[in-house]
Image (cartoon, rainbow, N blue to C red):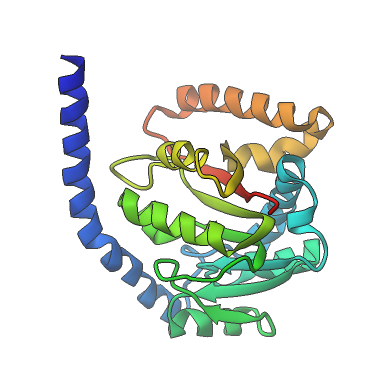
Amino acid sequence: MGCGRFAQARQSRKLAEGFKLRRINEVANWGREWQKGGDWSSHSSSQEQARSLVPAYLRFVRMMCGDKPVRAQASGLDIGAGAGCIAAALASFGGLQMTASEWNEDGIKLINRENPGLPTRMVDLMSFDDRDKWDFILCRELYPFTRTNAFSDQADMVSRAIDALAPGGVFMLIGSTVSFPHCADYDLLIRSFRKDARVQGVRGPFLEAVLLRFKLYAIFGRPGYKLANALAKMVIPLIKGRRWAAVGVTVFQKRNG
């Protein structure tokens, strides 16, 4: 009976995934209108949010993966950068040589308007084909991960990002903790890429809220992150309800050679 339930669940997932696969391009297209309009703040981090988030991201990567991926002058790419505020803050706070990307011309125009002078590039993660180039790649709240579940496509996008990393580089994937069938199954992605020969380590998902507040407990290092994250995952749903969703952070580090 157990095997039958497993097979049934697997079939249900395939059916649901097939439906979502047909919608992934439609979901990506939602970006066109908000990129054109003046009210982009509900779809992209503002400068104020970026100033709060970026120091927490840098502290987390250094603690989990070492200084190399986010050292001064390291090459960085923000995929799906929105207005480019996080990329600009990474350049400002961390000294990274950041490039902000969006997948269409309207997105590039938004970055140029809100953060003039920030290098830009048009990137569609579903066809991205850089190799061994970037020390740090960030992907935060990208629609194909946060608005649909299409595991094979999402795994391919993560794989493309890993290919694009220089040895020892880090891909930081940030998105809603709500899992299948609403958005990416991050736990499944993590289990899959921990077996990948290209990958040195996968860590997460850590709640973004924990990263933001962890400076109070930084003396405890990596174990402190893990303990704070475990406690938050237990306590917060009890306070806010089981259907409450948070923002999770996962890092994939490429092997050194």
Q: Position of residue 65 (x, y in %)?
A: 72, 45
Q: Quadrant of residue 127?
A: bottom left
**Where is residue 31 shown, x and y percent of the image?**
39, 71
Q: Locate residue 89 relative to residue 80 in the image: left or right.
A: right
Q: Position of residue 228 (x, y in %)?
A: 66, 27
How many numbered marks have been drawn onto this rendered protein structure?
A: 0
Q: Can residue 145 be seen by looking at this rendering?
A: no
Q: Nearer the viewer, residue 53 or 96?
A: 96
* Towards the viewer: 160 or 231: 160
Residue 154 against residue 127 in the figure, above or below: above
Residue at 19% in and 20% down: 3
Q: Is residue 198 visible?
A: yes
Give the residue displayed 32% in from the left and 40% down from the top.
180
Which residue reaches farthest top?
1
Give the percent coordinates (x, y) of residue 35. Answer: 44, 77
Q: Nearer the viewer, residue 176 or 96?
A: 96
- Decide which of 36, 123 is in the foreground and name it: 123
| Residue at horizontal 37 percent and vertical 59 percent from the top | 144
Q: Is residue 160 left or right of residue 221?
A: left
Quarter placement of the N terminus? top left
